[in-house]
Amino acid sequence: MIPAILRRAVLVLAAVVALLLGADFLVAHHPYFGIDGLPGFALAFGGLAALATLALGAAAGRLIARGAFDDD
């Protein structure tokens, strides 16, 4: 069961993301590579970068937890 505060936080975060994505359609883009001019590109790129950072951090945490970096 998901606590109510966590559910509320996820809903607020989803609403903020939806508002930012909607506002992205109102902004004039100046693309450099072409694909970066698409609406929602910054959202997708930032989200993928955040997921990659979390994955790398989890992998590093597993390495550290098993003692891979100990000076035995």
Image: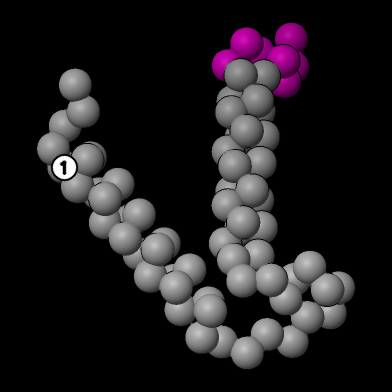
Which residue in the rendered view is the most extreme toward the bottom?
A: 28
Q: Above or below — where is 49 with respect to 21?
A: above
Q: Is residue 70 visible?
A: no
What residue do we see at 67% from left, 19% from top?
63
Magenta stretch encompasses residue 69: yes
Foreground pick, 56 / 23? 23
Q: Residue at x 48, y 68 (%)?
A: 21
**Residue 18: x and y, percent?**
40, 63
Residue in the picture at 19% in, 21% down = 1
Q: Residue 49, position in %: x, y?
A: 65, 51
The reply, left or right, for residue 15 in relation to residue 37 is: left
Residue situated in front as seen by the camera: 48 or 30: 30
Residue at the right extreme of this rendering: 33
Q: Is residue 48 visible?
A: yes
Which region is colored magenta?
Answer: 64-72
Q: Is residue 47 magenta?
A: no
Give the quadrant of the C terminus. Answer: top right
Residue that carries the numbered disc 1 in the rendered image:
5
Residue 67 is drawn in which quadrant? top right
User: Does residue 38 lie above or below 6 as drawn?
Assistant: below
Q: Tell me the residue at 56%/87% (across/down).
A: 27
